[in-house]
Amino acid sequence: MFLSLRAEVEDALEGALSELDFPTDDLGLEEPPEDVDSVLASSVAFRLASEAGAPPPQVAGQLADALDADDLTYVSEVRTQGPYLNFLPSEAYFEETLEAATADDYGHLEDRETSVVVEHTSANPTGPVHVGRARNPIIGDAVANVLDFAGYDVDRHYYVNDAGRQMAVFTWAYETFDEDDLESEPERDRIEYDLVRYYRKGNAYLENASEADVAEAEAEIESIMQGLEAGDDEAYERVSEVVDQVLSGMKACLGRLPAEFDEFVKETRFMRNGDTDDLVSRLKELDEAVYEDDAWQLELDDHGIDKNLVFLRSDGTSLYATRDLAHHEWKFEEYDRAVTVLGEDHKLQAKQLRTSLELLGNDTDGLQQVLYSYVNLPEGKMSTRRGTGVDLDDLLDEAIDRARQEVEDRLDDRIRDDELDDDDIERIAHQVGIGAVRYDIVSKQPTKAITFEWDRALDFEAQSAPYVQYVHARCCGILEEADLDPTTPLATQDVALADLEADVLATDAERDLLETIGRFPAVVDEAADDLEPHRVATYTREFADRFNAFYRECPVLADDVDPAVRETRLALVAASKHTIANALSILGVEAPRSM
RNA sequence: GGGCGUGUGGCCUAGCGGAGAGGGCAGAAGGUUCCUAACCUUCUGAUCGCGGGUUCAAAUCCCGUCACGCCCGCCA
């Protein structure tokens, strides 16, 4: 609804400006501060003052006179306040918002008939997912969700680096060592925890064994890599045995978040189908291609990158970057847009990738990269190879344990003693625990560095997932108390929706809440445009504040509430429920019915 | 050394050209005969790293400077 209102105001303001012979290129639209009664404001008058030869407040007055609110559906009045123009919402705005939000798909925007592939996580299949990487699936999943909500046709991809030296080392180690050679037990009963021990063992061996032994091992590793390069089935099968197993474990871990994927795209695919070879020949034809130090490289300094991109090693094998070029050309063929979520440590590569794709004749406008800062431990970096870091599984377990403890503690000193059985407690512990981890990560700007600390990551106090989830539980509680089903649209239930009149909602708390509900689709729109899901998180917090104010001041089910008010407030609660449930679902945070 | 990013009350964070710099944590004081107190109310606390500049208007843009992070492999 806010989107319609904004469009309407843009139109009207543009009309008024051209009527007065003012430029219409910048409408100065902005959201007013909280204590102002409007939903939308404009500060154009400032800019026009010198041109008009009049002080801003006077210009604002002229504009207000030129604008007739009677012509507008969603605006009841255009009011000036000093130099500002304020657009006040009409009853129709409130009513249509209320009606729209009682549908359970509220916030979904119109189909844009545009396909987009979101690639995220793509961690090397070398072992358990650690929290250093956890930001990637959490941000990536939310980016995919918000695009989906905004009407894009979204596919989620995990690009599997199964062709690099790391995997050759892993495969060699897996085939060479036995269980007996390993010093430790798996940290957890899952396949990637088992197999990572071979990887670590192999790396330790390469660092510490005698020169001759290392040379022998290197020869084997080299042969695996050459086999992959040649598109050799046997080499592929050998590596796949390790990759597929480890990946299945990582998939299980990510599934706990949950972060699901439509496709796992293997790097070797672009070697086996010949795309990489074709790409190499095309790269060689480019003006930027040079043959230096026995290797083929791309000289990119004319394009602002002072580091050459090697695309063919002196031994004739391709590199990750080469295959990734083929991978991206494939994405461009399959999708209208391609979004990649990756760590800031890959920034230079991302730039090289984009530039090289352009040199190859691709239009890269549809390629967008979302970069996030790495999560570090207070004591330093996390590394799968060295075995340092906190496993994502451990973080999630700890989060659930702490949440369970919290539920049990709170159960004792509740006012209303509703019946939570053991299943409920377990359900809530999962929803709250995992929700808190996701929310903590997704609510921050990705460019900010994070140092992982248990207590900070698992704080259930205000401004965290449980704070927002609690609002949802409150909504459900009220609806259930009124014998309504929180999960289905209000229109299908026994409530006289047609009679709803928003003017029954007279208090500021009700108005503010409804106004906030109305802004949700615009938040989705902007968050999708800028690929910034943290905006949705910021919105959920504002929303929770507004709802709590309503909850405090406006009883719904009390005996002395007028029936018409009761019905309308119930609709408002249902609208709130759908809004917050959908906002949380974009963030990948579950919305508990009770907690 | 070069490139990129980040610096907002003791701690965390929103805002990223416009209306008193919003929140949260921690600290102080209150609130439960009334739809779940994982809530709410009130108070304390900020020269928005520092110095210049642009603008009617700067946390926000530009220049410089400092601190921190990341990157600068024929690794991925």
Image: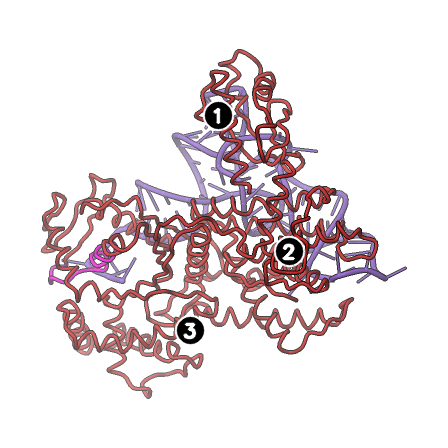
Q: Which residue is mark 1?
A: A14
Q: Amino acid at mark 3?
A: Ala
Residue A408 occupies which quadrant of the picture?
bottom right
Residue A310: give x, y in percent of width and height: 18, 53
Q: Amino acid at mark 1?
A: Glu
Q: Nearer the viewer, mark 3 or mark 1?
A: 1
Residue at screen point 20% across, 39% down: A302
Q: Which residue is mark 2?
A: A574
Callout 3 touching callout 2 (CB < 8 Å): no
Q: N-terminal of the two: label 2 or label 1?
A: 1
Q: Report the quarter where the C terminus of chain A lies.
A: bottom right
Q: N-terminal of the two: label 3 or label 2?
A: 3
* Colour-to-chain, purple: B
Given the image, what chain letter belongs to the residue carrying mark 1? Answer: A
Q: Colour of chain A?
A: red
Residue A475 occupies which quadrant of the picture?
bottom right
Q: Which residue is mark 3?
A: A252
